[in-house]
Image: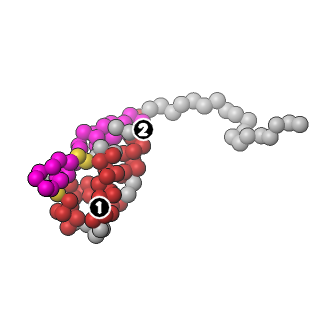
Amino acid sequence: MSLGRTIRALSDKNRRKVLTVLKRGDMPVGDILEHLSITGASLSHHLGILKEADLIGSRREGQQVIYSLNLSVFEETVKELTEFLERQPVSVPPSRSLTKQPPKT
């Protein structure tokens, strides 16, 4: 799991809507599409990004592809974010300036 990829996938409202729909249970593309106001091509794009982030999985049943949530990735993401927020700030030595000064000539 890549936290950056997961956050990128979650940053889009349509992808979050797809995940909300899948909270109801596993379902094929056609059923997911009924709950959204996007095109099939757009849904396919969003499903690809969610799969790349491993937030959803898919399996073939006959001619249909059934999508489902991958809850373990959500659990890992929450764990990583919690650990990040609980870490003590790193002590940074004071510097004369935060911007680079031009070299003296």
Q: Between residue 99 and residue 37, name the one nearer to us.
A: 37
Estimate the x, y position of residue 29 in percent, counting from the top left. Answer: 20, 59
Q: Mark 2 points at which residue?
A: 85
Q: Which of marks 1 and 2 is in front?
A: 1
| Residue 13 included in the magenta stretch of the image | no
Residue 16 visible from this viewpoint: no
Q: What residue type is labelled 1?
A: Leu
Rendered-image quadrant of the C terminus = top right
Residue 89 in the image: above or below residue 43: above
Residue 54, horizontal then vertical, whole percent: 30, 43
The residue drawn where x is 33% and y is 45% is 53
Q: What element carries label 2?
A: helix
Q: Which residue lies furthest to the left in this view?
A: 62
Query: Which of 50 and 63 lies nearest the eye of the viewer?
Result: 63
Figure quadrant of residue 33? bottom left
Mark 2 is on which residue type?
Leu
- List the residue tagged with mark 1: 43
**Render colour scheme:** secondary structure
In the image, the segment drawn in magenta is 58-84
- Real-space CA distance between mark 1 and mark 2, rounded to the nearest whole angstrom: 33 Å
Q: In this view, does 30 lie above or below 95?
A: below
